[in-house]
Image (cartoon, rainbow, N blue to C red):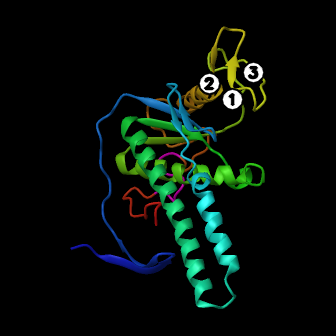
Amino acid sequence: QKLIKRVRIVQRADGYYVQFCVKIDNHEQLEASGFTVGLDVGLKEFYTDSDGYSESNPRFYRKGEKRLKFYQRRFYRKKKGSANRNKAINRLGRQHLKISRQRGEHAKRLARCVIRSNDLVAYEDLKVKNLVKNHCLAKSINDAGWYQFREWLEYFGQKFGRITVAVNPAYTSQNCSNCGEVVKKSLSTRTHVCQCGCRLDRDHNAAKNILTRALGTVGHTGTLINAWGEDTSTVLGSGLEQQVTSLNQESPGF
């Protein structure tokens, strides 16, 4: 029998849910794949990996924005305190919830696939809270769901015994992944061209630098330090409050 540690009632826009927190061993050891990958997240593409593959950005909020505006207009037209206004609030809330769930499921599916396919996954240690202070990009950054994606990467990294490494994002786009020289470029420059002959898509070059930086720190041994050289829980689950080897923590979806 499983021991229920905590019961929680949660209200969502579409109703109430009862969540049961149960202590279980959630670890699943996979065979080594022999592959490592670096991921560079972006707004045009959701991510580009160090092998040159790009995953398209679904832009759930942008696609649902027209519908949201429709519900918002209906909400503002209703009389304050009326039953119709409450119904309009509920419809608007359900639409926001739908988009949020789509974004979360997308991040979860991709993270699970990436983790199961690679022994080591490297990504940038982005401070999303600071990035969204740029009001021109805030909506697009939130719509991309980078933070959720990272949380799921780290969760599945612990679950499947894979190594996840967050690296210093400084100059990953500017440095040449072939020779290491700094090739300055603006955000509008989408192709990396170096004097050494290296010519790559900007994001592909960054992803290769991210992987190189991660391997330079942990090698192939899975040392529990991150690419800043600090002893931290960034590797194998930094998005959690602390590293718990028995995996008693809740998944990011809660």
Q: Secondary structure at mark 3?
A: loop
- Is 50 rendered above or below residue 70? above
Q: Magenta includes 236? A: yes
Nearest the viewer among 167 and 106 is 106
Mark drawn on residue 182: 3
Quarter of the image with the N terminus is bottom left
Label 3: how many Cα within 10 Å (few below 14, some 14–19, many 20+) = some
Q: Quadrant of residue 199?
A: top right
Residue, x 59% and y 85% (percent of image)?
A: 84
Amino acid on which the number 1 mark rests in the picture: Ser
Amino acid on which the number 2 mark rests in the picture: Asn
Span of residues in magenta: 235-243
Query: Which residue is the site of mark 2?
Result: 205
All told, the count of numbered labels is 3
Residue, x 58% and y 48% (percent of image)?
A: 59
| Front label number (3 vs 2) | 2
- Residue 174: horizontal and vertical position, in percent? 72, 26
Q: Quadrant of residue 198?
A: top right
Any part of residue 91 in sight: yes
Mark drawn on residue 173: 1
